[in-house]
Image: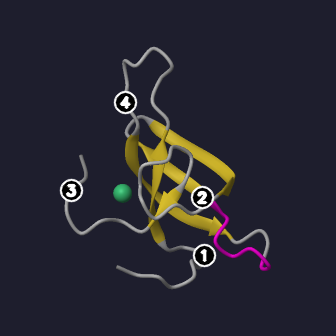
């Protein structure tokens, strides 16, 4: 698994929060780095998220390697995630 600092255009996962009613559980979504807004904090990034039904732009996403925390990013797992 890569531990390199993220760079613009790299493919990552974004952990999308589920819906408040629980109908849609949190999910790992394909995302791409659009900017490193603060070079003093290179692990907090801007991304475009490729949801199945549309794009979502987020300007400030913190890193979380566990993949369990909604609203964070990580490098894609080698195996399908639950
Ligand atoms: Zn993932």
* 56 sits to left or right of 30: right
Q: Main secondary structure of the magenta part?
A: loop
| Residue linked to disc 4 | 25
Residue nearest the viewer, comparing 47 with 63: 63
| Residue linked to disc 1 | 8
As helix, strand or loop, the secondary structure at mark 4 comes to: loop
Residue nearest the viewer, comparing 58 with 4: 4
| Residue linked to disc 2 | 47
Which residue is drawn at the image coordinates 80% and 79% (left, top)? Answer: 40
Which residue is drawn at the image coordinates 37% and 18% (left, top)? Answer: 23
* 82 sits to left or right of 42: left
As helix, strand or loop, the secondary structure at mark 3 comes to: loop
Distance between mark 3 and mark 4 Cα atoms: 16 Å
Distance between mark 4 and mark 2 Cα atoms: 21 Å
Query: Pointer 2 and pointer 3: residues touching (CB < 8 Å)?
Result: no
Q: Mark 1 or mark 4: which comes first in sequence?
A: 1
Which residue is drawn at the image coordinates 52% and 61% (left, top)? Answer: 64
Residues in magenta?
A: 39-46
Work out whether 18 lies above or below 78.
Answer: above
As helix, strand or loop, the secondary structure at mark 2 comes to: strand
Distance between mark 1 and mark 3 Cα atoms: 24 Å
Which residue is drawn at the image coordinates 51% and 43% (left, top)? Answer: 70
Residue 80 numbered mark, or none: 3
Image spot of residue 77 (x, y percent): 30, 65
Distance between mark 1 and mark 4 Cα atoms: 28 Å
Near mark 3 (Cα within 10 A), the count class, few <14, some 14-19 or many ≥20, is few
């Amino acid at each position: 698994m890569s531990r390199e600092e993220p760079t613009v255009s790299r493919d990552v996962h974004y952990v999308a929060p589920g819906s408040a009613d629980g109908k849609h559980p949190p999910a790992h979504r394909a995302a791409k780095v659009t900017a490193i807004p603060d070079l003093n904090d290179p692990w907090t990034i801007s991304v475009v998220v490729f949801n199945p039904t549309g794009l979502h732009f987020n300007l400030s996403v913190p890193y979380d390697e566990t993949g369990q925390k909604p609203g964070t990013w990580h490098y894609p797992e080698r195996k399908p995630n639950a």
